[in-house]
């Protein structure tokens, strides 16, 4: 075999180890790229289901909007003083969206918060008086905004305009203009945030590529020393320096290529193993790790760059030797001279390396710097973004919700906590796009937020109205925002837009300083949270719960029952303890009691339905543990009357009289004002409503009942209303119960009536279309939302806005539910919450895999570096072995030297990592999901970094020494290559 072929085709065990070490580094890049690109692609697929329905673009003036909008409709905006308050008025031009146009009045202004028409004075404008009427709520526009024809708004002093585009071509049309924001931006937020992570990954790739260069350089230098004799022969027989460099460049390229091949296989397997382990551990992950074109688009340039880096390292490593004359090329038998001896001689004895030279410090610094940069970025990102992933210990979220964004809790829980002296902040989490970048927003009451988050104003003031906001100092500096700026905002999980004015800049620890804080009402406009509902309530601490074990937190029972008849009572209990618990609960009512045994697992919840009956009429308290409910017991023959709460004077509505058991009452006397009628055999009568009738009295024998009645006069030009009676079942629901509102309707008129009813509860409303023939009746119902303890109004209105029926609903419960809600309760899940769960599950997997692969890569780099140092001193090690040193003693010396070198390298690597991260911060690379990541160089991070690095240093030294101690000492003393040239 020729000497040239020997240089290219023969590889020692050390060379093969180097291929494996390079393979580990490539495995890091391959596995990380595969996971990150797959997560990005999957998020794009998820985002398609939650993509925006359109875009909105803001302009400073109507003229600038008209110049760029083309044929698209331009909506002028004006701020108008009404009733002493500045309100936003949106002008609706001809050809605008049909839904918006239908809600716009032909004259005057329309507000979703106005019940009826009225005339107001408008000061400071050319329009002195204007009529305001009601309008339906339109999801895309805030209810607080007024709508008017654009020609009217242009008479005011306009302060901007917007162009709203919806439909299939919205992306293309808005893409031409630029500066547009999606109406629903949550999906765009996460997709854009993942792209930021890809950009950060590119920086990591550059550092790893440099590390691969260090490894290849070290390996090639060792190969040059091993083959000094062969190089001398090649040069002596006519080989040029260029030929020698070409041979070693090719050799380094082959070593790197084999390492890339190994790394690709290992990285692919490691990524799939990581996914399987995450699924086994319960992390929500669903990544498709197939080798798709997007993955190849990242990996092929990555491998190409690494291959070029390896070739360049081989060239540079062989250049010094190739330039020497053949006679000057030394054999590799003895110890190589060490550098930095002067520094070594000045060090105390216990700090001097015995076997490893200080030449290993520089490459060790490079390797450790790359790992420290990666570690600090991931730790800092995890610390900054942890509140996005999980609720904090003192955060009250919906029980079972996968993440805070999937939670829904009543805002009033904050009031309960504050009543117990605990600072609390109800908050709505928002994810949107601003200036083309992901922006974290939060709907809050700023004073409450500041108390819980340790935030303080830097400039400006706190918000005083719903259209004002404050911005974190970090995002203000990054986006060039200041007090007085007006910002156009798109929706988060709901298609909407609004404007807010920045009135202050605040500073807060962690990722809270990278957010835009809007009002709670603005947060509801941009999200799917209804009135009085928020995502979470953050508190300074959770309330103390006295005792332990099973607690009854809810009792739901009918408000009225019949004497001697069975009825069902629902009991909800939770186990606040950490072990299985059994408790006997006593139910007491009307001097009687019944025991129920409940068994609940730790942290669990149970519901028990119990059948009861009460033999004594009257009003009683049903007591279950420390929870009680009021209940009324009627005699079986007690009268019950169905009659509309509001009736039209002159109408002849239907009266129905029955007993509590449902039996019709015949020949009952019905009196309303000066009118009296008697019921027929079916218990039914009709009575004409006289003027001034306020009470309906029904008498049957000795039984009598009186119901209040509201008589209404004819409505000018309006339709006659249906007659309605509203009931709620159960009458006094518990906190965990979703009550049902039932509306019984009657058409007392001699013509068919059609209308759309709105059943409005505390936080939700339901519409029902109804058509009734003359004299016909029907019943419609709607399920209301769960509410915290308190009293709430439920109303029924027709399409003209007239209130047909109204009833109060009292929800029972106590503040112990606040503590229970923090950890226990019912599972809540929506498509978007599942998407968020998958996203954060994928990110958890990604971070864990990158840290693990990065540690392996660092061990590989350190192994190559220490192998080179040990290789240079192998004759000294042979002397140690020949004079009686055991492998364990030599092993201890090498590990000690590695720790000394690693400690010295740490002293330089930390400042270098700091400089690198500072530069990345200045260039805005360290911004992911709208959060500016501030590198953490606090004591616990430094200690953790030092401990991790020194552990990896020791491990690398162990691997590097293992191959050296196997051969006999004679081979090291004679200068033979450790491991030989066997293939």
Image (spheres, rainbow, N blue to C red):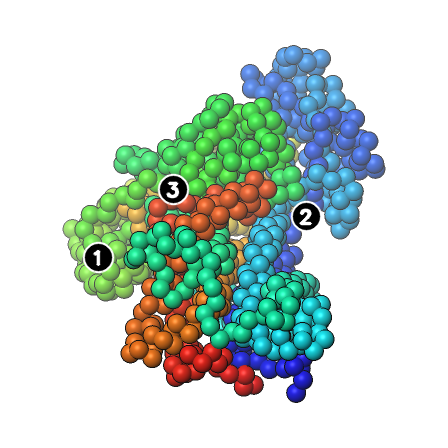
Q: Observer-nearest residue: 274 or 515? A: 274
Residue holding disc 2: 53
Is residue 417 or residue 774 the one in the foreground? 417
Tell how many labels.
3
Tell me, for residue 549, which label it has, or none.
1
Identified at 36% across, 75% down, the residue is 879
Crowding at dot 1, Cα within 10 Å, few <14 / some 14-19 / many 20+, comes out as many
Q: Earlier in the sequence, mark 1 or mark 2?
A: 2
Identify which residue, 579 or 323, lies in the foreground. Answer: 323
Residue 632: numbered disc = none
Separation (CA) of disc 1 from disc 3: 25 Å
The picture places residue 270, in percent across and down from the top left corner, at: 51, 72
The residue lying at 64 percent from left, 15 percent from top is 122
Give the structural element (helix, strand or loop) at label 3. strand
Q: Is residue 717 visible?
A: no
The x, y position of residue 205, in whole percent, is 58, 58
Q: Secondary structure at mark 2?
A: loop
How far from the left and from the top, in percent, is residue 530? 50, 42
Mark in front: 2 vs 3: 3
Quarter of the image where the N terminus is located = bottom right
Verify CB contact (< 8 Å) between mark 1 and mark 2. Answer: no
Q: Is residue 207 visible?
A: yes
Query: Element at badge 1?
Result: loop
Whether the residues at callouts 1 and 3 have beta carbons within 8 Å, the answer is no
Q: Nearer the viewer, mark 1 or mark 3?
A: 3
When the figure is inspected, residue 727 is found, relative to residue 611, above or below; the finding is above
Query: Residue at (45%, 81%) from the top-left corner?
Result: 974
Where is mark 3, residue-wise?
A: 538
Check if mark 2's residue and mark 3's residue have beta carbons within 8 Å: no
């Amino acid at each position: 075999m020729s000497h040239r072929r020997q240089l290219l085709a023969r590889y020692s065990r050390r060379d093969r180890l180097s291929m494996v070490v390079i393979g580990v580094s490539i495995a890091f890049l391959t596995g990380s790229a595969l996971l990150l690109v797959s997560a990005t692609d999957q998020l794009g697929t998820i985002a398609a289901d939650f993509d925006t329905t359109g875009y909105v673009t803001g302009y400073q003036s109507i003229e600038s909007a008209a110049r760029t909008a083309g044929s698209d409709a331009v909506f002028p905006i004006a701020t108008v003083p009404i009733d002493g308050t500045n309100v936003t008025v949106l002008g609706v031009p001809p050809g605008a969206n049909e839904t918006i146009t239908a809600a716009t009045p032909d004259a005057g202004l329309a507000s979703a918060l106005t019940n009826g028409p009225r005339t107001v004075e408008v000061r400071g404008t050319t329009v002195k008086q204007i009529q305001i009427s009601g309008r339906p709520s339109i999801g895309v526009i805030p209810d607080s905004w007024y709508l008017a024809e654009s020609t009217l708004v242009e008479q005011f002093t306009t302060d901007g305009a917007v162009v709203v585009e919806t439909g299939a071509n919205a992306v293309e049309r808005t893409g031409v203009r630029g500066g547009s924001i999606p109406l629903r931006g949550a999906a765009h937020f996460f997709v854009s945030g993942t792209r930021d992570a890809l950009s950060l990954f590119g920086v990591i790739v550059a550092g790893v590529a440099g590390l691969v260069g260090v490894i290849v350089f070290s390996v090639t230098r060792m190969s040059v020393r091993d083959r000094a004799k062969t190089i001398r022969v090649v040069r002596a027989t006519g080989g040029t320096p260029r030929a020698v460099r070409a041979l070693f460049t090719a050799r380094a390229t082959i070593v790197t290529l084999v390492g890339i091949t190994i790394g690709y296989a290992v990285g692919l397997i490691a990524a799939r193993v990581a996914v399987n382990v995450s699924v086994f551990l319960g992390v929500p992950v669903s990544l498709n790790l197939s080798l798709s074109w997007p993955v190849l688009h990242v990996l092929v340039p990555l491998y190409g760059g690494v291959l070029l880096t390896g070739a360049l390292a081989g060239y540079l490593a062989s250049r010094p030797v190739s330039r020497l004359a053949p006679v000057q090329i030394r054999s590799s038998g003895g110890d190589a001279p060490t550098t930095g001896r002067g520094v070594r001689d000045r060090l105390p004895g216990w700090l001097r390396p015995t076997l490893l030279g200080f030449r290993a410090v520089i490459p060790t610094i490079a390797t450790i710097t790359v790992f420290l940069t990666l570690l600090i970025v991931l730790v800092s990102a995890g610390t900054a973004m942890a509140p996005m992933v999980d609720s904090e210990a003192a955060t009250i979220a919906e029980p079972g919700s996968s993440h805070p964004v999937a939670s829904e809790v009543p805002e009033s829980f904050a009031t309960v906590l504050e009543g117990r002296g605990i600072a609390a902040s109800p908050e709505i989490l928002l994810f949107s796009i601003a200036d083309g970048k992901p922006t974290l927003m939060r709907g809050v009451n700023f004073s409450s937020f500041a108390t819980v988050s340790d935030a303080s104003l830097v400039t400006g003031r706190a918000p005083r109205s719903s259209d004002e906001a404050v911005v974190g100092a970090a995002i203000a500096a990054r986006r060039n925002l200041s007090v007085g700026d007006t910002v156009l905002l798109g929706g988060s999980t709901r298609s909407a837009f609004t404007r807010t004015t920045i009135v202050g800049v605040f500073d807060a620890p962690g990722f809270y300083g990278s957010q835009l804080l809007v009002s709670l009402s603005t947060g509801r406009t941009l999200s799917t949270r209804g009135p009085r509902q928020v995502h979470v309530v953050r508190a300074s601490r959770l309330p103390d719960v006295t005792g332990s074990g099973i607690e009854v937190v809810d009792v739901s029972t009918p408000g009225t029952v019949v004497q001697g008849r069975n009825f069902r009572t629902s009991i909800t209990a939770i186990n606040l303890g950490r072990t299985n618990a059994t408790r006997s609960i006593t139910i007491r009512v009307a001097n009687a009691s019944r025991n129920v045994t409940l068994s609940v697992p730790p942290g669990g919840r149970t519901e028990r339905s119990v059948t009861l009956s009460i033999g004594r009429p009257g009003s009683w308290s049903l007591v279950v543990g420390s929870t009680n409910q009021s209940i009324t017991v009627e005699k079986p023959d007690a009268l019950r009357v169905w009659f509309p709460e509001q009736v039209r004077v002159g109408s002849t509505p239907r009266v129905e009289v029955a007993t509590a058991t449902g039996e019709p009452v015949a020949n009952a006397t019905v009196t309303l004002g000066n009118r009296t009628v008697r019921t027929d055999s079916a218990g039914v009568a009709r009575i004409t409503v006289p003027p001034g009738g306020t009470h309906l009295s029904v008498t049957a024998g000795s039984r009598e009942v009186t119901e209040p009645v509201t008589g209404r006069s004819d409505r000018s030009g309006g339709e006659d209303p249906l007659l309605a009676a509203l009931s709620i079942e159960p009458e006094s629901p518990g906190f965990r119960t979703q009550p049902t509102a039932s509306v019984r309707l009657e058409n007392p008129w001699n013509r068919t009536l059609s209308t759309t009813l709105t059943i409005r509860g505390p936080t939700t409303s339901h519409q029902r279309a109804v058509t009734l023939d003359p004299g016909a009746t029907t019943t419609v119902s709607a399920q209301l939302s769960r509410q915290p303890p308190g009293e709430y109004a439920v109303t029924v209105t027709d399409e003209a806005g007239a209130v047909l029926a109204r009833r109060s609903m009292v929800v029972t419960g106590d503040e112990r539910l606040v503590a229970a809600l923090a950890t226990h309760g019912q599972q809540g899940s929506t498509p978007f919450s599942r998407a968020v769960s998958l996203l954060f599950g994928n990110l958890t997997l990604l971070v864990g895999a990158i840290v693990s692969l990065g540690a392996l890569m660092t061990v590989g780099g350190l192994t190559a570096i220490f192998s080179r140092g040990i290789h240079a001193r192998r004759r000294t090690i042979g002397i140690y072995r020949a004079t009686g040193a055991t492998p364990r003693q030599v092993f201890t010396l090498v590990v000690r030297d590695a720790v000394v070198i690693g400690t010295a390298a740490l002293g330089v690597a930390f400042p270098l990592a700091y400089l690198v991260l500072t530069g990345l911060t200045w260039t805005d690379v360290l911004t992911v999901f709208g959060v500016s990541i501030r590198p953490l160089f606090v004591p616990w991070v430094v200690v953790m970094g030092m401990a991790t690095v020194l552990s990896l240093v020791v491990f690398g030294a162990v691997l590097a020494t293992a191959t050296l101690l196997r051969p006999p000492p004679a081979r090291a003393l004679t200068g033979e290559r450790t491991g030989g040239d066997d293939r």
